[in-house]
Image: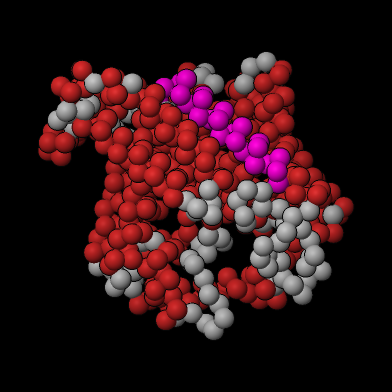
Amino acid sequence: MNLIWQKLTLSDFPLKEYLSTSYLRSFVVGVGSRWRQTSILVQWGDVIAAVLVSLVLVLAPFTVKNTTLLGILLVACAGFWLLLTLSEDKVVSSQSILATPIHLLVLLYGGICVVATVLSPEKKAALEGLINFSLYLLFFALSARILKFPRIRSWLLVLYLHVSLFVGVYGVRQKFFGAAQLATWVDPESPLSKNTRVYSYLGNPNLLAGYLLPAVILSLVAVFVWQGWLRKALALTIFIVDLASLRFADSRGGFIGLAIAAVIFVLLLRYWYGESLPQFWRKWLVPILLGVFLAIFAVAVGVSENFRLRMLSIFMGRKDSSSNFRINVWTAVVRMIRDFPVWGIGPGHDVFNKIYPLYQLPRYNALSAYSILLEVTLETGFIGLVSFLWLLLVIFNTGWLQLQRLRQLKSADGLWLVGAIAALAGMLGHGFVDTVWYRPAVNSIWWLLVGLIASYWTCLNQQLTPQQANSLYSEPAPN
């Protein structure tokens, strides 16, 4: 079973040997290597790439109404990644370009999106969606390349957390000083109809929650990683402010995602510190922490009537207008999937907007499927869904294996992997019932974190003996 699992997750895939014999790599990578020796631009390529990624992170939450500038930056990131790839030294490229299992699955899923576009009933609209999605895939490739450098990794993580603090502060301010409700985000017939849901600079409470969710987890990681009391106090401040702003957004999908991320974070944190804990804490740390979370949740439900009603609305089904809207959209999307089961309708919301009106129920207009899994299935069919699930499997398995490796090395970088894995799981939980995953402010953070996991990748066969590699898949001994 271990061998099958390793093959499925590409854990021991001989990527270096594969790249050395790849015709695509031999014809594309390194064609401009001579130019690299004299070009100042390429010699400073990783620094320039870090600047481009930094600009995306800074502008993403502030350009939700006009994404033209962000699109230009993503095009610049894609073009610069291509430039670095074409000018890369072929010896170095076998270890730095397309050199992780995650890259291979991203390439596979991107290829399926291309086929879905070609076979789409609305090819022009699907082509635009394919171009937009491809920019994020290349943003991932560029991020994975530069995040291998500790200084750049630290800079980008610190930058994102500081930008999230700025966004979170404004969200908290809206709660106390009021904010115009730009849409009907709460059932107008419910007791919460006059409740203020904050949205900060993102213009939508659910989008704000999706953006802040990974920041909450990563800021908690920073409390453990950052050295010095002032830095730890800053990390704790970011955690409290962003968590408060997420709470005031009153996003039920955000609450679901946060709960999933918190459980994963606790379990991984217990694994990370397991050997250094006394016997009592090895046994009771997870139950105690989860019990504390449940106690805090119970207190919040008991103290805040708004929070209690908001949480109860999750289980009201069609009696809640927001839930009823999603159910009706999901029903229409399932009918669309039945008519386009193999390759879907093509990627992007433009093609969705052209085909969805033919299936929608009256008065239930929508811009997307309001669920990642339904959206992926609709856009690329069940073939794309299988590919996407395979990509997720490889992402989390890669993160888990590299977490084990870093734990053996006692490297504090492993804690960032703990945060990345937990944050990605939480974002998936949120995206399962909402549409924010496809928005630039959230999608850019998703692919940044996937790039973070990919940047730590090291082939098992390069580091461990076969016996050690197999032991990584065996069940841990009871404490």
Rendered-image quadrant of the C terminus: top right
Q: At 42% across and 33% down in the image, what residue appears?
A: 52
State left or right for residue 202 relative to residue 337.
Answer: right
Q: At 29% across and 66% down in the image, what residue appears?
A: 124
Name the quadrant containing residue 345.
bottom left
Give the residues in magenta.
148-171
Q: In front: 169, or 140?
A: 169
Total label count? 0
Rendered-image quadrant of the N terminus: top left
Q: At 85% across and 59% down in the image, what residue appears?
A: 305
Could one spot residue 462 in this view of the protein? no
Residue 32, x across and y down, in percent: 16, 28
Above or below, 64 relative to 332: above
Residue 58, x across and y down, in percent: 53, 37
Q: In front: 248, or 416?
A: 248
Principal SS element in the magenta part?
helix
Above or below, 207 relative to 479: below
Above or below, 9 relative to 437: above
Q: What colour scheme does the image use?
A: secondary structure
State left or right for residue 233 relative to residue 93.
Answer: right
Residue 123, x across and y down, in percent: 28, 67
Q: Is residue 149 magenta?
A: yes
Residue 396, x across and y down, in percent: 45, 41
State left or right for residue 454 relative to residue 426.
Answer: left
Q: At 44% across and 34% down in the image, what residue appears?
A: 53
Above or below, 463 relative to 422: above
